[in-house]
Amino acid sequence: MTSSGPVFSLAYSSVAVRPFDDLALAALLAQSREANARAGITGMLLFRAGSFVQVIEGDEAGVRALMARISRDPRHTRVRVLVEGTAPARTFADWTMGYEPITAPTAPAPVGFRNTFDDLDNLEDPALVARAVRELSLWFRVRQARRAA
């Protein structure tokens, strides 16, 4: 999906009210991808240990309308907008909703490694939150590029 100008981007985190198994996640992704394609929304979804981090991008009215629906969705709680603003171009232009499951590590994590999204909820400095979201976005794009190669 291409955009001819600036794009509005919003990242949020939330916690699932009930466990999401692979079947429930597949259904959520199918529904999201179809709706996002119709609305001109692109983005990514990360899921780990019952927590979601999602970036959605498109025209501001469409992104805000989607965020309002997500906030009312009974499958989520603790919905928190992490960062929002205008960017010169889409970061996830190739994905109506790119998805990456994050599995539990099998070995001890290196120092400084993020293996949950809990720290995003505790960051109060907007610059640190924005940096964390950028790092997650970069991680996602690198993983997707490796899969495509």
Image (cartoon, grey):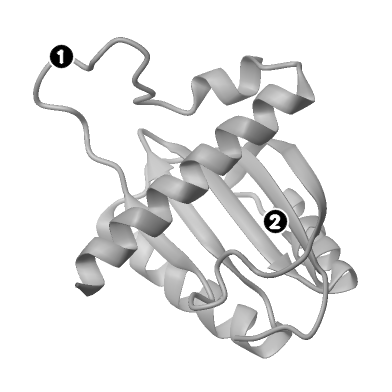
Reading the chain from its start, which is encountered first: label 1 or label 2? 2
Q: Residue at x 62, y 78 (%)?
A: 36
Give the camera-side residue of 135 and 56.
Answer: 135
Amino acid at circle 1: Pro
Q: How crowded is the residue under tag 1: few (<14 C-alpha within 10 Å), some, or many (20+)?
A: few
User: What's the residue at 44%, 77% (across, down)?
Assistant: 30
**How many numbered discs?**
2
Residue 110 visible in the picture = yes
Tell me residue 51's x, y (percent): 47, 36
Q: Is residue 61 left or right of residue 41?
A: right
Q: Quadrant of the N terminus?
A: bottom right
Residue 108: which numbered mark, if any?
A: 1
Instruction: Please state which amino acid type lies under the numbered disc 2.
Output: Ile
Residue sitting at the far right: 61
Helix, strand or loop for disc 1: loop
Q: How far, Cα to Cα, is label 1 from label 2?
A: 34 Å
- The percent coordinates of residue 77 (x first, y second) are 64, 36
Residue placed under numbered mark 2 in the picture = 70
Q: Nearer the viewer, residue 134 or 18?
A: 134
Q: Position of residue 26 (x, y in %)?
A: 35, 68
Closer-to-camera residue (55/25)? 55
Would residue 53 appear left or right of 68 to someone viewing this image? left
Residue 18's image quarter? top left
Residue at the extreme top: 111
User: Which residue is more in the foreground, 97 or 127?
Assistant: 127
Q: Quadrant of residue 123?
A: top right
Question: Is residue 16 shown to the viewer in this render?
Answer: no
The answer to whether the residues at label 1 and label 2 have Cβ atoms under 8 Å apart is no
Are there few (<14), some (14-19), or many (20+) residues within 10 Å of tag 2? Answer: some
- The secondary element bearing badge 2 is classed as helix
Q: Is residue 37 above or below residue 81?
A: below
Note whether 34 is above or below 144 in the view shown.
below
